[in-house]
Image (tube, rainbow, N blue to C red):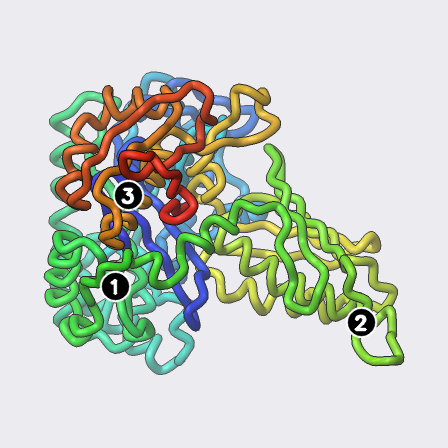
Amino acid sequence: MSAMPNESWVALLEDDKLVEVMLERPDQDRIIGGIYLGRVEAVLPGIQAAFVDIGTEKAGFLHVSDLIRDEDPEEENGKGDRRRHSRTRKYPPIQDHVQKGQTLLVQVTKEPISSKGPRITAQISLPGRFLVYMPHSDNVGVSRRIEDRAQRTKLRRMAKKILPRNSGGIIIRTVSEEVTEKKIEHEFKHLRESWNKVLAGSKSQEAPALVHRGAQLIGGVIRDLFSDKFDAVKIDSKTIYNEVLEYVKSVDPELSNRVHLHKGAEPLFDKYGVGEEIQRAFERKVPLKLGGHIVIEPTEALVSIDVNTGRFTGKGKKKDPAKTILQTNLGAAREIAKQLRLRDIGGIIVADFIDMESKAHRDQVLHELKTHLGRDRARTKAFEVSSLGLIEMTRQRVRPSLFNSLTSVCTSCRGIGRVYTPATVLRQIERSLRRAGSAKEEKRIVVRLHPEVALRVIEEEPGLLKRLRSRTRMDLSLRDDPLIGLDEFRLLSGPSETDVTSKYAVA
């Protein structure tokens, strides 16, 4: 975990390989999980949905399936798979339940993405470390990821025992597999107190208003993911380290010795090669280990992935074209699953595999893809290989992808290409200067940057240079240059202003 005043990153590594990365910035307000007092702007019977003003730039989208209770008591997030249910269940008309101007207490389940506003639900859930409290439900469930039948029965009985009558429903989370009844009861009381505060807050405010803010990135990751399956959590901010350590000691003391503060001169993400991996996540072409490559093309409607053999023609003297294609497609299936998770690509994905005549080979590739998609925390589904060699997939999308979070539409090319935002460029500059400071080889650096980026420093981050001077012990200054690209910068060292950008620049 890497935290700076204007940016927080969480990187998950498996076998020293980056598999998942998450980002949070103040200018990209994280609203998922937030509870709002909203006002209905419009009711649309044709699509059985309503638009609710919750105070964000775009109104929240409320489907009838998110209004009428239909949760799956086995889903850990308390929301269930509403798309699946909505296909099989007939709901009463939404206009019978909500009217224009009505106030509703709702919760954000998906961040605003592109031109779409946030997705909201009236079925509120409050997640804790060990359980999820659902005040409008009466179900008691256990996460499907706890597979032992005897343990599931034990946990369900424990939950029912501590749950007072007519006090809502709860779901026991995966991390609670060995939890004690005392801890479950303590957390339930805490979550119920939080819900009472939400109700009190909703009565004292006028719509639209934020009533309860969801967990921020690092806190949410520690709460939801950190368990004995992790070897360690490493944090480069002492403040965040102390907060995380205090929380872990309170909920699971045995894990506290796995929380570490990074103290080395080398930046944490540099040590593990995370920055380079993030940079590669923006490349269209991804090479495959056995040869060949895949090309990833995000569009407004879907993400297309093309599989190519490249120069790979198989191994051995007797080359079998069918086996060569199979090997390439199997490698592509593994890489596609990895890239979807790493880039946090959601929505509809279509993968164009190399044509396979054998049904057995097509089934083998589909099985390989599903196996590796199963490692993903987000819900994914892959359908049968079509006669054209296409596999259609869906992946749960709750926030903008890494690509959309770090880039903006290029005004010069009218949306054909993308460039880094000024905020992203500043964070790149900040990390680069911190790297230069840790090397202790430079005394003076002039940063040459685009005027729009320099303007952001003046208007929104006036204390940035002072903070970096203190941190790096270097004489730092900025020089705007309209001839430099919007997402470019140069680091000029010493009186001679030698260009040292390539030496210290990071993604």
The residue under the point 36% across, 54% down is 77
Q: Quadrant of residue 33?
A: top left
Q: CA distance from mark 1 to mark 3?
A: 22 Å
Residue 352, how many percent across, how many down? 74, 51
Tell me which residue sits at (26%, 61%) in the image. Answer: 131
Residue 215, given in percent of the width and then of the height, sits at 24, 47
Q: Could you tell me the amino acid type at mark 1?
A: Lys
Instruction: Tell me which residue sits at (72%, 60%) in the image.
Output: 292
Please give left or right for residue 467 compared with residue 460 in the image: left
Is the Cβ of the residue at disc 2 closer than 8 Å to that at disc 1?
A: no
Sequence-first tag of 2 and 3: 2
Q: Earlier in the sequence, mark 1 or mark 3?
A: 1
Tell me the SS state at disc 1.
Answer: strand
Q: Please provide percent x and percent y for residue 399.
A: 42, 41
Packing grade of label 1 (10 A; few <14, some 14-19, many >=20) is some
Eye-nearest disc, 1 or 3: 3
Q: Which of the 4 image quarters holds residue 32?
A: top left
Residue 234 is tagged as 1
What residue type is disc 2 on? Gly
The amino acid marked with disc number 3 is Leu
Distance between the Cα atoms at labels 2 and 3? 46 Å
Figure disc tally: 3
Residue 30 placement (x, y as % from top left): 31, 38
Q: Which residue is mark 3?
A: 433
Image quadrant holding the N terminus, namely bottom left
Callout 2: SS: loop
* Residue at 35% from the left image edge and 75% from the top image edge: 152
Label 2: how many Cα within 10 Å (few below 14, some 14–19, many 20+): many
